[in-house]
Image (tube, rainbow, N blue to C red):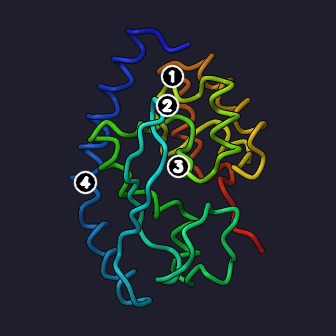
Amino acid sequence: MIDGFNRSLKRLFDICAASIGLIVLSPVFLVLVILVRRSSPGGALFCQERVGRSEVPFICLKFRTMAAGSPNVGSHDAASSWITPLGKKLRAYKLDELPQLVNVVRGEMSFVGPRPCLPTQSDVIAARRKHDVFSVRPGITGLAQLQGIDMSTPEALAEADARYIRNAGFWQDIVLVINTVAGKGTGDAAAK
């Protein structure tokens, strides 16, 4: 379980790393905004309500990877035909997640934690309540994502999230971030 010291260290790391990331990656953000806007009609950012710590809703930011007007569903329920060609590349390299650095700075998310679900994913919410997963901030990446467990299997997801919370520590988070950057894990795959 994350104790007070580790929680403070985690938050300090989140603020520092996300702030530095936003500054250093600002040219990448600019290029991606232009590419997304030029690749298909619609805005560059995708803003979606998600369930955060203590079940408080927040607006999760991502680069838009689906055609404008696509239904508001979880990734595993999204048809692959809704995803733009550029969106497929952004998802493959996890670049669509970069705007979540803003969510991290605002304290709505952490670098590592359970991936935030939609308020409509009642099975996921119920399983996470049972395992006390909402006791921590959701993350840009997480143990379940790296293990290829997505929101289509709510109980397995909640169990992996709870396992992460039980064993959470600063160095474990660093290893999970490195594995994410190295391209390990699959996260939420789109439906066929």
- Which image quarter: residue 132? top right
How far is the residue under mark 2 from the one under mark 4?
19 Å
Quarter holding residue 91: bottom right
Q: How far, Cα to Cα, is label 2 from label 1? A: 5 Å
Assess whether mark 1 and mark 2 are in contact (beta carbons under 8 angstroms).
yes
Give neighbour class at mark 2: few <14, some 14-19, many 20+ (Cα, 10 Å): some
- Quarter occupied by the C terminus: bottom right
Task: Please tell me which residue is depicted at 71% across the width and 49% down the height of the picture.
Answer: 150
Percent across and percent down for residue 167 are: 62, 17
Q: Which mark is residue 174?
A: 2
Tell me: 25 left or right of 127: left
Circle 1 sits on which residue?
171
Between marks 3 and 1, how big is the CA–CA gap? 15 Å
The residue labelled by disc 3 is: 181
The amino acid on which the numbered mark 4 sits, given as a three-letter code, is Val
Where in the figure is residue 85, as x and y percent of width and height? 57, 84
Labels 3 and 2: the sequence-earlier one? 2
Residue type of the residue flagged with mark 3: Val
Disc 1 residue type?
Answer: Trp
Would you place residue 156 above or below residue 99 in this image?
A: above
The CA distance from mark 3 to mark 4 is 16 Å
Q: How many marks?
A: 4
